[in-house]
Image (tube, coloured by chain):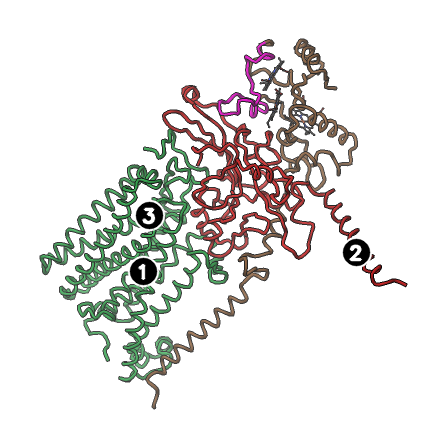
Chain colours: A green, B red, C brown
Amino acid sequence: MLPNESLLNYYFPNEAEVHWSLMIVIYPYITGLVAGAFVVSSLYHVFQIKAFENISRFALVAAFCFGLFAAVPLLMHLGQPFRAFNIFFTPHTTSAMSVFGFVYSSYMILLMVELWLVYREHFIQKAKETKGMAGWVWKSLTLGVTEYTPEAARVDHKLTTFLAALGIPWACFLHGYVGFIFGSVKANAWWATPLQPIIFLMSAIVSGIAMLMLMYAFIRWRTKKPYDFPMIQKLMVFLWGFFIIDFFLEALEIIYVAYEHGHHWSVIGPLLSGPLYGTFLIVQLLVLSVIPFLILGYITIFKPWGRLLLYLANLASLMLVLQVLFMRFNVVVGGQLISKSDRGFTEFHWEFFAREGVLPAIIILSAPFVAFYVISRFVPILGDAPEAKQ
Amino acid sequence: MTSPSSNARRVFLQKLLAGSAAAGLFMVYRHPVVAALTGDDGDKAPDHDFAFVVDINRCIGCGQCVRACNVENNVPEGQFRTWIERYVVTPSGVHIDSPQGGMNGFDEVDESLAEEALNTFFVPKLCNHCAEAPCIQVCPVGATYRSPEGFVLVDSEHCIGCSYCVQACPYGVRFINHEKRIADKCTWCYHRVSKGKLPACVTVCPTQARLFGDLNDPNSAVAKVRQADNWDVLKPEAHTESMCLYLGLQRVVV
Amino acid sequence: MNISPRSHIYRLIVLLVIVVVGFVAVRGLAIPSSWDSENFYRLDSLEELKLQPMHLGGNESCGGASCHDQERVAKHKTQLATVGRGSHKGLACENCHGPLSAHVSDDKKVASAVIDRENKLCLNCHAQLVSRPKDFPQFDTEANGHWYFDVEITKPCLDCHSPHNPRQMAAKKDKSKKQPKATSEQTSTNGEVQL
């Protein structure tokens, strides 16, 4: 079915290529994971959800690992990656994208400072124990302050809470702005909605929580440590809550456009019944949303325990992690399939080895986990020892 | 003995002479329509305001403009700074095509389609050099801008190739140049106009379906078109203040 | 040792300040010198864009202002005048003879201009297409002149039409033998003969 009484699928000659491809699909995905993981750690630090005490540090490290690679897909995508710093040097403030450099780097600094405060005691201890080169590295991480006094710990705790609180609006900003980049493009009917930032934000939190669940379960399984079932139970309740909001907004957007039946629907209708039928309607909205919604609802209401909880939680989390990945794809690529001639659709060509192909995307998506593994060799992340307290 | 007043008069005369000599040179060496960007290096802002007129009633779809543009600007194969579309409106719908951007002209449509056609015509497309250009707004590094004379241009040394401008343009005129890996689009042949020539596509158009000129010059063809006020712009709902005025634009055209 | 419980924070702040100052310094150096911070672009880019070489010269470059071969200049001027008189007066020489840069570059002749005698050249503009404006002359085997001479689309257009002034019929000796009527008919109706 072609839009606007078109007899022939027509797109402008320059639209033969989808300019924002897989790299721009995984870029908001990774930043979303950062924002989502951070929110979990703040749930403990700021909102005092005690169940998350043992994973708040883990969440922070995970957020940091994702953050390390959040900008990589962008660099891979840029036509001129060596000029990337222009975005810092001459940021054009009328552009939503220009603040990226500042939001992203300030957010990473915030994350690093918070991590540093959390791990300072560990750094000091290591600096005292270790000799030689490694010792110097640990020492430089302490910034030369090699005493960890109770007063200093109190200062750290206050500051951590403050940063965690500051981090929430900041994470919203970081991710909401990614949504804004898309939502503010009036030339693209599938993107242009003021709901876009909040949809991006909610799906970011969903993907972050779900990803933490998967990582947590994996690590506990590998290290043969007991699972913290109350924590998992609580995490799933939050996941359900955020997902309901997320799903509701996603559905709302479609329903609105369909009901308005205006100019946008003239292209979005054929888009959904055509190129996006499979990946959006069937996979994203039906399979990967309805099933986890039901599972999470079951977990929340009937409170299963033990193995069953573990399996269900992992299944739902896996589906939601994929749901958000599909959502990013359907938004980023889906929107570009609509020809600006309003008379047809372009085709997305999957590439594997190309610079923006599937392989680089997989490598970039796995890089944070490698980083996490490396970091976990040096600092305790999910130790059973409780987090440093005042 | 010279009175101050006669002195002043002489200075005035000298200036007048110099001025008219310069103006005379200008007239000789510059195309009258685009007596343009070079010359006058006074510090006041250039008072040109260029615009483009596309007359759909005249376009014959020969593709000379597309070929000329590709040669003039070394546009990579498969990408287009300008192109021609063919619209065939029938009772059952609209058939639009643009084989290779219309570069090699068009072959006749199928007989059945031709018979059904209620209305059919060619539409040349190019950058609209919008006064409120979305592409300029979204460029994160200031690598695209509107020159004082109204050309929307790309700074090829500063562009990072993020393609946000490509997304923002409602007309699909921007692309990422495959060879240079930066944003690219029609410049209205800024390099030609600054030397007193017309844009390449205007130069070669056999039917004068493309006109280019200065709106500030009341005698220019574009100023007259604008004055006559029977023009339209593409996608007026996008509110981009397009500077490409179309004559004979039908509502079916997007 | 008696250190303040906030000393690590102070050190961190110093570190951050160094980073920020370093950034500001680097940024100061990295902003292009001709940056117009009000209109937000690099002014030099205008000058750079002007340097782009031109490939098309337009008809004004065919008058031979810089050409030393006077004989050729004269010939070109004749063609210019011929084209300027007839129904092809709106055309650019480059429509049929290719871009100037392939013919003359840096005021030197680099190659002969393309001369394409194929029907494709004419049909590019004159083939019959429903989408063309109705008042544009399109090749039609049924049109008066063509019908009269049984002209097929494969018949060389140049046999009868002069490319520079197509209303005027070609009067080449070898061709005129084949189409004596065409020549005579047209010369009489048009009152002009190409020399």
A68 left or right of B88 in image: left
Q: Name the residue under label 3.
A: A331
Please check whether the numbered discs 1 and 2 fall on a single chain.
Answer: no
Q: What stretch is highlighted in magenta?
A: C120-147
Q: Which percent across, then down, holds residue B207?
A: 59, 29
Task: Examine the structure image and report whether residue A57 is included in the region drawn in magenta.
Answer: no
Q: Which of the two discs, 3 and 1, labels the residue nearer the N terminus? A: 3
For numbered disc 2, what is the local secondary structure?
helix
Distance (Cα) linking label 1 and label 2:
75 Å
Question: Mark 3 falls within which chain?
Answer: A
Q: Which percent across, then down, holds residue A148?
A: 29, 83
The vertical placement of B252 against C183, above or below, is below
Question: Mark 2 falls within which chain?
Answer: B
For numbered disc 3, what is the local secondary structure?
helix
Q: Point out the frontmost of discs 3 and 2.
A: 2
Please report contact status of discs 3 and 1: CB closer than 8 Å, yes or no: no
Give the amino acid at mark 3. Answer: Val
Quarter of the view holding residue C38 = bottom right
Give the amino acid at mark 1. Answer: Pro
Q: Which percent across, then down, holds residue A303?
A: 10, 59
Q: Mark 2 points at which residue?
A: B12
Q: Mark 1 points at which residue?
A: A368
Question: Mark 1 falls within which chain?
Answer: A
For numbered disc 1, what is the local secondary structure?
helix
